[in-house]
Amino acid sequence: MATPPFDADPYRAALVDALARIPVGPDWRCADIGTGTGSVSLALAALVGPAGRVWAVDHSPDTGDELAAVARETGTPQLVPLVQSAEEFALPVQVDLAWCRFLLMHVAEPFAVWRRMVAATRPGGFIVAQEPITTAGRVGGAPLSMPDARHPDIGASLPAFPAASGCALVSAWAVAPAGAGPGPVASYLAELSGVDPGDDPIVLPVLVTVIAQRPAAS
Ligand SMILES: C[S@@+](CC[C@H](N)C(=O)[O-])C[C@H]1O[C@@H](n2cnc3c(N)ncnc32)[C@H](O)[C@@H]1O
Protein backbone atom coordinates (compact mmCIF):
# COMPACT_ATOMS: atom_id res chain seq x y z
CA MET A 1 0.00 0.00 0.00
CA ALA A 2 1.72 3.17 -1.17
CA THR A 3 0.93 6.48 0.49
CA PRO A 4 -0.69 8.61 -2.22
CA PRO A 5 0.66 12.08 -2.89
CA PHE A 6 -1.39 14.50 -0.80
CA ASP A 7 -2.44 16.44 -3.93
CA ALA A 8 -3.89 13.26 -5.48
CA ASP A 9 -6.53 13.13 -2.74
CA PRO A 10 -9.77 14.53 -4.23
CA TYR A 11 -11.10 15.18 -0.72
CA ARG A 12 -8.07 17.33 0.12
CA ALA A 13 -10.12 20.56 -0.01
CA ALA A 14 -12.46 19.29 2.73
CA LEU A 15 -9.44 18.31 4.83
CA VAL A 16 -7.77 21.70 4.36
CA ASP A 17 -11.06 23.52 5.14
CA ALA A 18 -11.50 21.53 8.34
CA LEU A 19 -7.90 22.13 9.43
CA ALA A 20 -8.37 25.88 8.88
CA ARG A 21 -11.26 25.92 11.37
CA ILE A 22 -9.28 24.39 14.26
CA PRO A 23 -6.38 26.09 16.07
CA VAL A 24 -4.13 23.03 15.63
CA GLY A 25 -0.46 23.93 15.88
CA PRO A 26 2.95 23.03 17.32
CA ASP A 27 2.91 20.70 20.33
CA TRP A 28 -0.64 19.46 19.77
CA ARG A 29 -1.43 15.82 20.43
CA CYS A 30 -3.73 14.34 17.79
CA ALA A 31 -5.18 10.97 16.87
CA ASP A 32 -6.32 9.87 13.41
CA ILE A 33 -8.41 6.74 13.79
CA GLY A 34 -8.69 4.46 10.75
CA THR A 35 -5.66 6.18 9.27
CA GLY A 36 -5.30 3.94 6.19
CA THR A 37 -2.63 5.36 3.88
CA GLY A 38 -2.18 8.23 6.32
CA SER A 39 -3.33 11.29 4.33
CA VAL A 40 -4.92 12.89 7.40
CA SER A 41 -2.17 11.77 9.78
CA LEU A 42 0.56 13.25 7.57
CA ALA A 43 -1.30 16.56 7.25
CA LEU A 44 -1.66 16.72 11.04
CA ALA A 45 1.99 15.72 11.56
CA ALA A 46 3.11 18.65 9.38
CA LEU A 47 1.07 21.06 11.51
CA VAL A 48 2.08 19.80 14.96
CA GLY A 49 5.78 19.52 14.11
CA PRO A 50 8.40 17.43 15.90
CA ALA A 51 7.29 18.58 19.36
CA GLY A 52 3.75 17.35 18.76
CA ARG A 53 2.40 13.86 18.29
CA VAL A 54 -0.02 12.17 15.91
CA TRP A 55 -1.17 8.68 16.75
CA ALA A 56 -2.08 7.04 13.44
CA VAL A 57 -4.50 4.34 14.56
CA ASP A 58 -5.71 1.43 12.45
CA HIS A 59 -6.68 -2.16 13.12
CA SER A 60 -4.55 -3.31 10.21
CA PRO A 61 -0.96 -4.24 11.23
CA ASP A 62 0.15 -3.75 7.60
CA THR A 63 -0.96 -0.14 7.74
CA GLY A 64 1.04 0.36 10.93
CA ASP A 65 4.20 -1.11 9.35
CA GLU A 66 3.88 1.01 6.24
CA LEU A 67 3.27 4.22 8.15
CA ALA A 68 6.23 3.47 10.43
CA ALA A 69 8.38 3.27 7.27
CA VAL A 70 6.91 6.56 6.02
CA ALA A 71 7.68 8.22 9.38
CA ARG A 72 11.29 6.96 9.20
CA GLU A 73 11.81 7.89 5.55
CA THR A 74 10.28 11.35 5.86
CA GLY A 75 11.94 12.19 9.20
CA THR A 76 8.57 12.57 10.92
CA PRO A 77 9.07 11.17 14.43
CA GLN A 78 5.85 12.81 15.62
CA LEU A 79 3.88 10.29 13.52
CA VAL A 80 3.31 7.25 15.72
CA PRO A 81 1.46 4.28 14.19
CA LEU A 82 -0.73 2.33 16.59
CA VAL A 83 -2.43 -0.96 15.76
CA GLN A 84 -5.74 -0.78 17.60
CA SER A 85 -9.39 -1.25 16.73
CA ALA A 86 -11.59 1.82 16.77
CA GLU A 87 -13.99 -0.02 19.09
CA GLU A 88 -11.20 -0.24 21.68
CA PHE A 89 -9.55 3.09 20.88
CA ALA A 90 -7.81 4.48 23.97
CA LEU A 91 -4.53 6.32 24.60
CA PRO A 92 -2.44 6.85 27.75
CA VAL A 93 -3.02 10.63 27.54
CA GLN A 94 -5.92 12.75 26.31
CA VAL A 95 -5.47 14.37 22.91
CA ASP A 96 -6.19 17.91 21.76
CA LEU A 97 -7.78 16.61 18.56
CA ALA A 98 -9.32 13.28 17.54
CA TRP A 99 -10.11 12.79 13.85
CA CYS A 100 -11.61 10.12 11.65
CA ARG A 101 -12.28 10.07 7.94
CA PHE A 102 -14.07 7.26 6.08
CA LEU A 103 -13.99 5.15 9.25
CA LEU A 104 -17.43 5.27 10.90
CA MET A 105 -18.97 3.95 7.68
CA HIS A 106 -17.10 0.66 8.32
CA VAL A 107 -17.65 0.07 12.04
CA ALA A 108 -20.61 -1.78 13.57
CA GLU A 109 -21.59 1.05 15.94
CA PRO A 110 -20.52 4.47 14.63
CA PHE A 111 -21.84 6.48 17.58
CA ALA A 112 -20.05 4.20 20.08
CA VAL A 113 -16.75 4.88 18.25
CA TRP A 114 -17.50 8.62 18.18
CA ARG A 115 -18.04 8.51 21.95
CA ARG A 116 -14.64 6.84 22.39
CA MET A 117 -13.10 9.67 20.39
CA VAL A 118 -14.81 12.20 22.66
CA ALA A 119 -13.61 10.37 25.78
CA ALA A 120 -10.03 10.38 24.43
CA THR A 121 -10.09 14.17 23.93
CA ARG A 122 -9.21 16.70 26.64
CA PRO A 123 -11.86 19.18 27.88
CA GLY A 124 -11.85 22.04 25.35
CA GLY A 125 -10.35 19.79 22.67
CA PHE A 126 -11.80 19.03 19.24
CA ILE A 127 -13.33 15.99 17.56
CA VAL A 128 -13.66 15.82 13.76
CA ALA A 129 -15.45 13.22 11.66
CA GLN A 130 -15.55 13.23 7.87
CA GLU A 131 -17.90 10.56 6.56
CA PRO A 132 -19.76 10.04 3.28
CA ILE A 133 -23.26 9.90 1.97
CA THR A 134 -22.25 7.31 -0.58
CA THR A 135 -25.57 6.99 -2.35
CA ALA A 136 -25.48 10.73 -3.16
CA GLY A 137 -22.56 10.01 -5.54
CA ARG A 138 -23.20 9.60 -9.26
CA VAL A 139 -21.35 8.02 -12.18
CA GLY A 140 -22.82 8.79 -15.56
CA GLY A 141 -25.94 9.94 -13.69
CA ALA A 142 -26.45 6.60 -11.88
CA PRO A 143 -26.28 6.46 -8.06
CA LEU A 144 -23.23 4.89 -6.42
CA SER A 145 -23.49 2.02 -4.00
CA MET A 146 -20.98 0.53 -1.57
CA PRO A 147 -22.39 -2.83 -0.50
CA ASP A 148 -19.29 -3.65 1.59
CA ALA A 149 -19.71 -0.65 3.89
CA ARG A 150 -21.81 -1.19 7.01
CA HIS A 151 -23.11 2.39 7.04
CA PRO A 152 -22.57 3.83 3.55
CA ASP A 153 -24.70 6.92 4.32
CA ILE A 154 -23.50 7.60 7.90
CA GLY A 155 -22.53 11.14 6.87
CA ALA A 156 -26.22 12.07 6.91
CA SER A 157 -26.43 11.24 10.65
CA LEU A 158 -23.18 12.92 11.75
CA PRO A 159 -24.48 16.44 12.54
CA ALA A 160 -26.46 15.04 15.49
CA PHE A 161 -23.43 13.34 17.07
CA PRO A 162 -21.92 16.36 18.91
CA ALA A 163 -25.03 17.32 20.91
CA ALA A 164 -25.81 13.66 21.61
CA SER A 165 -22.36 13.30 23.20
CA GLY A 166 -22.41 16.52 25.24
CA CYS A 167 -20.21 18.48 22.80
CA ALA A 168 -20.70 21.77 21.00
CA LEU A 169 -21.14 21.72 17.24
CA VAL A 170 -18.42 24.07 15.95
CA SER A 171 -19.03 23.60 12.24
CA ALA A 172 -20.70 21.19 9.81
CA TRP A 173 -20.83 21.14 6.02
CA ALA A 174 -20.71 18.80 3.03
CA VAL A 175 -18.77 18.70 -0.24
CA ALA A 176 -18.50 16.36 -3.22
CA PRO A 177 -15.52 16.36 -5.61
CA ALA A 178 -16.62 16.01 -9.24
CA GLY A 179 -15.00 15.61 -12.64
CA ALA A 180 -14.94 13.81 -15.99
CA GLY A 181 -12.10 12.07 -17.78
CA PRO A 182 -8.69 11.09 -16.38
CA GLY A 183 -7.58 12.74 -13.13
CA PRO A 184 -7.72 12.31 -9.36
CA VAL A 185 -11.51 11.99 -9.25
CA ALA A 186 -11.60 9.18 -11.85
CA SER A 187 -8.61 7.44 -10.22
CA TYR A 188 -10.23 7.62 -6.82
CA LEU A 189 -13.46 6.14 -8.15
CA ALA A 190 -11.61 3.36 -9.96
CA GLU A 191 -9.83 2.44 -6.73
CA LEU A 192 -13.07 2.61 -4.74
CA SER A 193 -15.24 0.59 -7.10
CA GLY A 194 -12.81 -1.23 -9.40
CA VAL A 195 -14.65 0.34 -12.34
CA ASP A 196 -12.95 2.57 -14.91
CA PRO A 197 -15.45 5.42 -15.46
CA GLY A 198 -13.94 6.39 -18.84
CA ASP A 199 -15.19 9.86 -19.73
CA ASP A 200 -18.47 9.57 -17.80
CA PRO A 201 -19.25 12.48 -15.47
CA ILE A 202 -18.49 11.62 -11.85
CA VAL A 203 -19.75 13.09 -8.60
CA LEU A 204 -17.93 11.33 -5.77
CA PRO A 205 -19.80 10.57 -2.53
CA VAL A 206 -20.74 13.67 -0.56
CA LEU A 207 -18.38 14.00 2.40
CA VAL A 208 -19.96 15.46 5.53
CA THR A 209 -17.57 17.12 7.96
CA VAL A 210 -18.52 17.71 11.57
CA ILE A 211 -16.25 19.60 13.96
CA ALA A 212 -17.17 19.30 17.63
CA GLN A 213 -15.63 20.70 20.80
CA ARG A 214 -15.72 19.19 24.27
CA PRO A 215 -16.87 21.65 26.90
CA ALA A 216 -13.93 23.13 28.83
CA ALA A 217 -13.51 21.81 32.38
CA SER A 218 -15.28 24.03 34.90
C1 LIG B 1 -11.52 3.79 3.71
S1 LIG B 1 -10.06 3.69 4.67
C2 LIG B 1 -9.86 5.40 5.11
C3 LIG B 1 -8.44 5.78 5.33
C4 LIG B 1 -8.17 7.23 5.72
N1 LIG B 1 -8.86 7.59 6.96
C5 LIG B 1 -8.51 8.20 4.63
O1 LIG B 1 -9.45 8.97 4.77
O2 LIG B 1 -7.81 8.20 3.61
C6 LIG B 1 -10.65 2.99 6.17
C7 LIG B 1 -9.54 2.59 7.13
O3 LIG B 1 -10.15 2.28 8.38
C8 LIG B 1 -9.59 1.09 8.88
N2 LIG B 1 -10.61 0.46 9.72
C9 LIG B 1 -11.79 -0.08 9.32
N3 LIG B 1 -12.47 -0.54 10.37
C10 LIG B 1 -11.70 -0.29 11.47
C11 LIG B 1 -11.85 -0.54 12.85
N4 LIG B 1 -12.96 -1.14 13.33
N5 LIG B 1 -10.87 -0.16 13.69
C12 LIG B 1 -9.76 0.45 13.22
N6 LIG B 1 -9.55 0.71 11.91
C13 LIG B 1 -10.51 0.33 11.05
C14 LIG B 1 -9.21 0.27 7.67
O4 LIG B 1 -8.18 -0.66 7.96
C15 LIG B 1 -8.76 1.35 6.70
O5 LIG B 1 -7.39 1.59 6.81
Image (cartoon, rainbow, N blue to C red):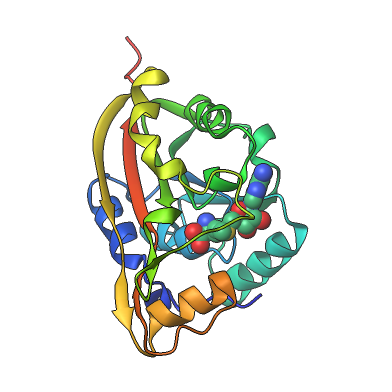
Residue 104 coordinates in the image, percent (x, y): 53, 43
Decide which of 53, 32 is in the foreground and name it: 32
Residue 132 coordinates in the image, percent (x, y): 42, 51
Against 63, residue 135 (above or below) is above
Badge count: 0
Q: Residue at x 35, y 14 (%)?
A: 217
Q: Residue at x 76, y 58 (%)?
A: 61
Q: Which of the 4 image quarters holds residue 147?
A: bottom right
In the image, taking residue 134 as reference, residue 181 lies left or right, namely left
Say if residue 197 shows up in the picture: yes
Residue 203 coordinates in the image, percent (x, y): 33, 69
Against 96, residue 11 (above or below) is below
In the image, taking residue 74 as reference, residue 200 lies left or right, namely left
Say if residue 78 shows up in the picture: no
Against 10, residue 30 (above or below) is above
Which quarter of the figure is the C terminus placed in? top left
Residue 206 coordinates in the image, percent (x, y): 35, 56
Q: Residue at x 30, y 53 (%)?
A: 19
Against 126, residue 15 (above or below) is below
In the image, taking residue 65 as reference, residue 165 lies left or right, namely left
Which quarter of the figure is the N terminus placed in? bottom right
Judged from this view, the residue extending furthest toward the top is 218
Q: Residue at x 40, y 44 (%)?
A: 155
Decide which of 92, 11 is in the foreground and name it: 11
Judged from this view, the residue extending furthest toward the front is 142
Ligand 1 resides in the quarter of the picture at bottom right
